[in-house]
Each structure stands twice: as C-alpha cells, then as structure tokens.
Amino acid sequence: MGTHGRTGVGRVVLGSVTEQMLRESPVPVMTLHERTNFDPDIDSLLVPTDGSDTAEAAVDHGVDLALATDATVHVVTVVDVGAIAGSFNVGDITEKLQTASNQAVEAAVQRAEDAGVSSVESTTLVGVPDRSICDYADEHETSAIVMGTHGRTGVERFFLGSVTERVVRPSTVPVIGTKATAPKKSTDTM
C-alpha cells in the first residue's frame, strides 16, 4: 500500500488508510511511499524485535521471507533509554533493559538459524526506536523492514503511539507490518 508519509497535524486530522490497514489487516501489509527505494530482489531484511508477541510474529514472517528470497536477516532491538529518563537508578534499569533486549535478539536469531536462514546478523541499539530502526536500515542498505504491529486503535493508539507507524512515515525502504495471530484454542476437552 502507498502512504503519503504525513506527520504532525496533517496525519492526525486526515488520518491514514494505510496506517489503519497496518493495525487491522489479518495479513501482512507492505507499505511504501514515493521516496521508497523498492528493489524486488530482496537480499536483506531488517527485523526489529522486543520479544513481544507481535515482534515474534514479525520474526516468523521475516524468516519465511528470508528463506523464500535467500536474504540476510538483520535482527535488531532498541533500548530506549529516553523512556526511563528521570529515574533514580537509571544504570540498573538500563542494564535490565539491555539484558531483556539481548534475550529477545538471541531468541529471534535462534529461530532464524533453526529455520535454515543462511545469514543472520544481530545488534542491540540504544536510542529512540523509530529513528534507530530507520538509521540502521539506511546504513546497512536493507531491502525491507519487517515489523509487528499491536493493532491498537482509539485513545490507546493516540497516547501509546506505534513504533511501526513512526517507522513507516520516514522509511526509505518498504516496511512490512504484521500482527500477532490469536493463539489457537484447544479443541481437547478433559
């Protein structure tokens, strides 16, 4: 889907059909805008993770896409130290965030390697998540970004925002957004 890449008041007032599709679509959605560099020969994918269910769904999709295209997978996580500014014990909190982030990356790398992806790279970044992800994609010339979206709507989306939506707007490569699927209910009765 195409996107205008609007920010600020224009996006809030006009909304975005593409952003709505990212939040609600039961299938992955690829977004691009007029500034997007799109090469159908996908040779590298950036898959950000935070260990959440939605990030795990994106890892699964990224792994499947990498296997189909023989692409390198770049798994990254971003420790957002700005989110903890003003805390009294920032060092301990930062260390715990980095440990959790590293565990999420290691789990994603293991999933990719177990599935047979031939080339997997991983990095833990520190900074603002959306900016860090876009900068990494540009610096490493990735073909696309595969990210999970929580599907938040209304007031929750307005206040919490969406890293995926904030990556879509400035990204110079396609962004493929996917939602976590609901866990399958067991049909066994005991």
Image: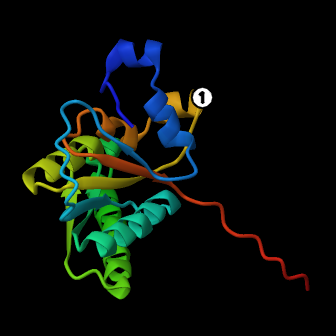
Residue at (58, 51) in percent of width and height: 26
The single residue placed furthest to the front in the displayed view is 40
Q: Which amino acid type is marked by label 1?
A: Gly
Left or right: residue 170 versus residue 178 is left
Say if 80 sits above or below 158 in the image.
Answer: below
* Residue 126 seen anywhere in this rendered image of the structure: yes
* Nearest to the observer: residue 151 or residue 124: 151
Say if 128 sits above or below 50 in the image.
Answer: above
**Which image quadrant for residue 31?**
top left
The single residue placed furthest to the right in the displayed view is 190
Residue of label 1? 154
Mark 1 crowd level (few <14, some 14–19, many ≥20, 10 Å Cα):
few
| Quadrant (top left/top right/bottom left/bottom right) for the N terminus | top left
**Which image quadrant for residue 168?**
top left
**Which image quadrant for residue 141?**
bottom left
Q: Position of residue 76 (x, y in %)?
A: 26, 62
